[in-house]
Image (cartoon, rainbow, N blue to C red):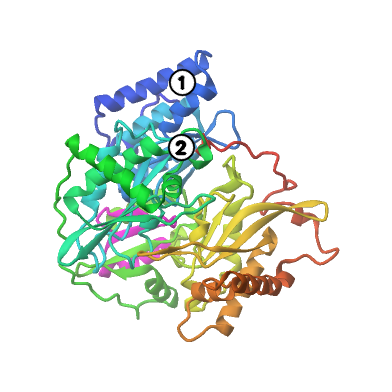
Amino acid sequence: MTASATPSSSSSSSAVALTPVVEQEIAKFQNTLDLLAQGAIDADKVFKPYRLVHGIYGQRQQGENQMVRIKLKYGVCTPAQMRVLADLSEELTNGISHITTRQAIQYHFVQLSDVPGMMRRLEEVGMTTREACGNAVRAVVGSPNAGTRIDEPFAIEPYAEAVYQHFLRGPFSSNLPRKFKIGFGASDQDILAQVNLQDIGAMGVAKDGKLGFRILAAGGLGSSPQAPIQLYECLPRDRLIPVCEAILRLFHKHGDRTNRAKARLKFVLRKHGDDGFRKLFEECLAEVDKDGITGQILPDTLPPAKPSAIPLDVGSAEERSWRKWNVKPHRENGLAVVSVCVPRGDLPATQLRALADITEQYSQGDARTTNDQNVVLRRVKLADLSAVFTALTALGYARKAHTLVDVVSCPGASTCQLGITLSKNLGRELEQGLAALNDERVLQAHINISGCPNSCGQHHIGTIGLHGAASKIGDKLVPHYVLMVGGADEGNRIQFASMVARIPARKVATTILALAAWYVAERSATESFVHYLRRINGDGLEKEAAKAVKAKLKERLLPIFSYKEGELAEADLHDLGSEKLFSLDEIGAGECMS
């Protein structure tokens, strides 16, 4: 389909008229494309930063192949939006809508000429690519469970929406030193909140009878992770917008614009320290208040918490297992929250349309994407659970969600210019190779994979984290993964995973199976997998003692992941799922650094 083609019937049925601002943006994008084709503008210096701000990202395959990122505000994706996503993926991409670890949707293999038409069709159903990439305020994320749990003090989504609207196309929003991320949560017990990973993290809290937000700043992952600084224990809700604006202005003023590698807000915190950072923040907040930027308390009262127990002794053994792992009570009586396990976040068009139908029929149209690359159906009636299980089973989406065998992975070297390894292929192998694990406490852990050290797959917070690497065995270049253990975002604190060893790609599954077996055999009565891994890795010990414990762990693992003399075969010189010899020749400059 060309960029000027008429939207398909399923897309146009819910289309809305676009605002003049959006119409102008699309027209300007088309005009800029025309200028590029005429050679009137520089592709690298002029067009690249322009397209990045519009969510268009260069792909490893180069040429006309583009990645398009679509912002989903705090993961909301309606059935109408799902159908448009499915249509566009089928018509203009490789047929896959990929869920990212920030709840966005990414398309791959999009031709530049198709982008303006794609932008229009997305905007017609309330989705945008604006500021999804580049030096901009990215999508405002939020826990997909927000509004469903019994331990939430108030509804956070009205505030997430207000922050999203405040920054979209804002005066500073696309002219920053580098990217800027905002996230909301409503419970420290919610494993999908992740407020500690953001430039601004806002956690809804109740403190001394008052409702507000715990405000965190300058957190982040990347190749050098940083725990956030807490600015407020319980910020009044009507001060949220001014405080967020002040943190953004701090970054705009003091972020490093000369060294891209140190241009994130976390480096401002490292440079100035906690006290210095707070001083800069207070200066910016005074400026914001002087400018008259205000917030307000929004309608945020949640329905009374009257959860219904999930019937577990129902149907087949498979359905009972699914109910145990994938279904949780909603705070409202008679409702359940259902997690849909989407392998590696890849939604083919046919399955996505079916998921739209399921959401519409059984979840009152309410679904969210998650930061572990799944989908949550938030308002399923208890009486409909068996029908939902049957429908999800037919799609292949009834596997255990949010578990060790529900592997999180970025696209890696399949499309990313910085990717070293084919991380999604490792994810697929682990899902198959670990499928026989059935110990509940093992399954409660998580595996996160990135194709390079930059942590797009969030390997720093995995119970087991893995990032792509290259190492030689003898004179042969072999795909490897750096094994890290013990990471977790625990709501009111974060602990980053600690490196153990470099593992050949084809030995990763065997290594993880060994760690799981050791845990089952050696754990204490209450010790979780993540705490066991921290213990045998020496976490929390004095430096020299920790070094000795870590060395002992690596020595114990060495016979499992090392190749014996003469054992290295031709297949080991290929990345998983690849027919080519492993090489670093295709790695380029990643546009996340552009």
**Cα distance in 3D space between marks 2 and 1:** 30 Å
Q: Position of residue 435 (x, y in %)?
A: 56, 70
Q: State left or right for residue 104 relative to residue 299.
A: right
At which x and y percent is residue 237?
18, 53
Residue displayed at 39% across by 51% down? 198
Would you name the residue on which mark 2 appears? 256
State if disc 1 and disc 2 touch (CB < 8 Å). no
Q: Nearer the viewer, mark 2 or mark 1?
A: 2
Left/right placement of residue 587 relative to residue 491 reads right
- Vertical side of 103 occupied by 500: above or below: below
Q: Against 406, is 542 above or below?
A: below
Percent coordinates x, y for residue 278 in the rendering: 32, 49
Res 474 → quadrant: bottom right
Q: Which residue is mark 1?
A: 33
Please say whether residue 233 is visible from this viewpoint: yes
144 lies above or below 527 = above
Question: Dot 1 lies on which element?
Answer: helix
Amino acid of disc 1: Leu
Question: In the image, is residue 168 part of the stretch drawn in magenta?
Answer: no
The crowd level at tag 1 (other Cα within 10 Å; few <14, some 14-19, many 20+) is many
State left or right for residue 182 relative to residue 285: right
Quarter of the image where one finds residue 519:
bottom right
> Considering depth in this image, is 561 or 60 the residue closer to the camera?
561
- Tell whether 205 sits left or right of 389: left
Q: Amino acid at mark 2?
A: Asp
SS for callout 2: loop
Where is residue 483 shown, x and y percent of the image?
Answer: 61, 62
Q: What segment carries the magenta color?
A: 363-392
